[in-house]
Amino acid sequence: MSKLIQLATHSSARGDLTVFEKILPGEIKRAFYIYNVGSPTQERALHGHRKESNALIALAGQCRIFVTNGEEEKYFHLTVPNECLVIEPGDWHIIDEFTKDTVLLVLSNECYDPSDYFFDRP
């Protein structure tokens, strides 16, 4: 099941530095970000992956992610850039409740493969 991770953050008078390492299995093969979502009721994702793991980080703004694997259901709220939601293979998810300033970074351990996606909620 998906899990929320606190990323290591180093703070000083010069600002904050947050580190993303050793979070996903394997290496990061793809990165993309979602922004300019027109409405808080707009839903994104509505799918899962068979083998891909994803790490979601709200670099700015906030959003909510609903995740289910058919046995468990859980809501996560990404509100700060030092939290990371890891979505595991087999987890189906919806992203919504975007604020106007949301920039959601997604890091993946697989390249894009349409056959890895499933759209039916378990």
Image (spheres, rainbow, N blue to C red):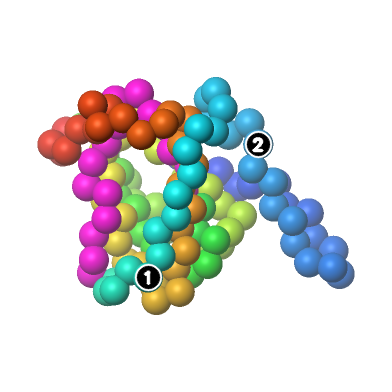
The answer for how far apart the CA atoms under marks 1 and 2 are is 27 Å
Report x, y in % for residue 88: 39, 32
Which dot marks residue 36?
1
The residue depicted at 31 percent of the width and 30 percent of the height is: 113
The residue depicted at 58 percent of the width and 59 percent of the height is: 81
Callout 1: helix, strand or loop? loop
Front residue of this view, candidates 63 and 39 = 39
Front residue of this view, candidates 44 and 30 = 30
Front residue of this view, candidates 2 and 114 = 114
| Residue 121 seen from this side | yes
Q: Is residue 106 magenta?
A: no
* Nearest-to-viewer mark from 1 and 2: 1
Callout 2: helix, strand or loop? loop
Q: Is residue 52 left or right of residue 103?
A: left
Q: Amino acid at mark 1?
A: Asn
* Quarter of the rendering containing residue 15: bottom right
Residue tagged by mark 2? 21
Q: Is residue 81 above or below residue 71?
A: below
Q: Amino acid at mark 2?
A: Glu
Q: How many marks?
A: 2
Mark 2: give few (<14), some (14-19) or many (20+) Cα within 10 Å: few
Q: Is residue 74 above or below residue 64?
A: above
Query: Which segment is the magenta one?
Result: 41-56
Q: Is residue 55 magenta?
A: yes
* Quarter of the rendering containing residue 102: bottom left
Q: Is residue 109 above or below residue 57?
A: above
Report x, y in % for residue 80: 56, 62
Q: Earlier in the sequence, mark 1 or mark 2?
A: 2
Q: Specify the farthest residue to the right.
A: 13
| Residue 62 seen from this side | no
